[in-house]
Every structure is written in structure tokens, then in C-alpha cells.
Amino acid sequence: MSKKCQIDFVSEVVNLTAPDFIFNDFYYFDKIPSTQDFAFEIIKRKKKINPSVVICNTQSRGKGRKGYLWSSPKGGIWVSIFLESTLKLENLFLFVMIAAICICETIEKETNLKPKVKWPNDVFVNGKKVAGVLLDVETCIDNGKNKIIIGLGINTNNDLRLTKSKLKNKHHNHYPMTTLKDEANKPDISNAHFLSRLLNNLSHHLSKIESDTFVNENILNNYIKRIMESRSHIVYSFNVDEKAFEGEIVDVDIDGSLLVRDIHQQKIIKIHSANSVNLR
């Protein structure tokens, strides 16, 4: 993509944003190893950071949770946003909840699809994975502000066969994947419109995350509702103490942890969400 096309794309995204939009800086690349790693390099260099957005057309080493590769060919939305936060470490999973809910709400507005959240950080449509969230945190002791990086990968228009081929032999993928274009049966999803709506939604919630308890409670309830709804579409498998088992979700705690019933042993186990927050 030419520089002019990149500028036009960002301009279209920004022109559709609300007046109280919090993101000040945009970085756009045709190809980059990882938007998450680029954002991390920025926050390491700067003592104070503005809420910013990193966008690319393709990633050669896109990152998923637990170090897995996130396949990122042309056509999808591959974005990282970064900002500062005074939230305590035990509350940082709220960023994952907000990002997942904002993706779901954007999908609902841009398509006729009904997305669900698969715990802890994936978005599914019709029982297939369509998006994911990655949270990295640079902890700071000096000023009490942690630097937050939220990675967002959304399969919008990317070629599904190519996306799957890039994951082959990289890691075992338990769940099928799809794209919004395939599920909505549309000629194309406007990435500019989708991203603008998504960033507007994120901006709204993130601007209130440290001051508005009511908004955060709504996010938590929405997150829990979508997790519980996902149980009818997804068979959950868990790993505790290196022992894998299939489990039924009983409840979701305020910190994102799960209460799970082991299907075979019929006992309740608490699964923590801590490994969904990567501290650097």
C-alpha cells in the first residue's frame, strides 16, 4: 500500500471519530513483524506516552496469547493501542474485557452477526474464532502509572485458507476459525468503518476506566453474559498443573477468573486469568 493510501485510510478512520476521541498518534505500516512489539519499543523510549494506535496491513510475527503465532495476512485488522493507566495490577484484566466487548459490539453494528466471547480473550461467531485480544503491561514504580498495550487481531476480509496455512505446524489449534466476510456472506467489510467504530468505542470506555464504576460494572456484566452464552457453542478444555480436562463454566469472577466444573470428576476448580496479562 502506498503512503497516500495509508494517509487516506487513517484520515477516513479519524474523520469518523467522536470529538472526545482519546487517541492522539497513529502509526501505519504496510508490513511489520509485530504491532505489539513496535508499541513496546515506543513506550520504552518515552517517559510519558499519549494514547496511540499502531496499524499494519500484514504482520510477519503477529503475536497471540502464550507466545502463539497470530496469522496476519492482508485483509484483516491488525492493531495495537497503547496508553498509561493508574489501575492496580489486579484490575488490569478489565482492559481485556473492554477490548473483547468493544469488538463484539462493533461486529454487531457492522454486520448481522451475534458474536460471543470465549474465555479469556477470544471472540467467536457461529462457534468459530474471528478475533482475539492480547494484553501487555510495562509496570512502572516511579509515577504509579503502568503502560498498557492492547493487541487486537480481527479476521475481517483476509483469505481464510491463507490465514490457516500460515498457522499450519505452528501450534495445535483446538478451535475452527473464520472471517467476518465469510460469516456475514458480504462482498467486503469496510476496514476503515469497522476500525473507526471500534476505536470510538474503545476511546469511550478507556477514558472512563479509572473513574466510572458504573461503566466498568456494565462491561463486567456484558463480558460475563457473553462468556456464559458461549457455553452452548464451545466445548471448553483447560489445563491445570499440566493436566488437561474438559470443563463446564459455572461462573465468572470480577477479576476474570472462572469457576469450572470438571465434567469427568464433577468437582469445581478455579481457573485464574493471570496468564492473560503479560507483565514486561
Image (cartoon, rainbow, N blue to C red):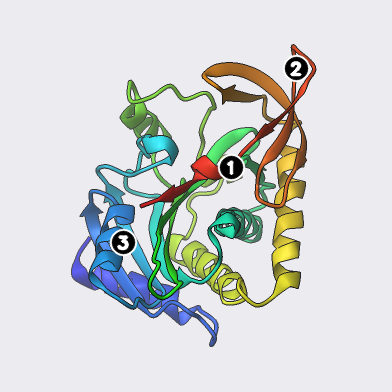
Given the image, on which type of amino acid does mark 1 rest?
Answer: Ser
Left or right of 38? Residue 133 is: right
- Give the residue at the far bottom of this rendering: 19
Q: Do the residues labelled 1 and 2 touch (CB within 8 Å)?
A: no
Q: Where is residue 83 in the image (x, y as percent from the top left)?
A: 43, 70
Residue sitting nearer the eye, 118 or 263: 263
Given the image, on which type of amino acid does mark 3 rest?
Answer: Ala
Q: Position of residue 172 (x, y in %)?
A: 43, 21
User: What distance separates the C-alpha of mark 1 from that of mark 3?
Assistant: 23 Å
**Disc 1: which residue:** 273
- Give the residue at the far front of this rendering: 142
**Residue 181 appearing in the image:** no
**Disc 2: which residue:** 263
Q: Earlier in the sequence, mark 2 or mark 3?
A: 3
Where on the picture, by quarter, is residue 87? bottom right
**Disc 3: which residue:** 39
With respect to residue 52, does 110 lie above or below?
Answer: above
- Give the residue at the far top of this rendering: 264
Q: Earlier in the sequence, mark 1 or mark 3?
A: 3
Q: Earlier in the sequence, mark 1 or mark 2?
A: 2
For the residue carrying disc 3, how many other residues have a C-alpha within 10 Å: few (<14), some (14-19), or many (20+)? many
Q: Residue at x 41, y 76 (%)?
A: 143
Q: Are marks 2 and 3 in contact (CB under 8 Å)?
A: no
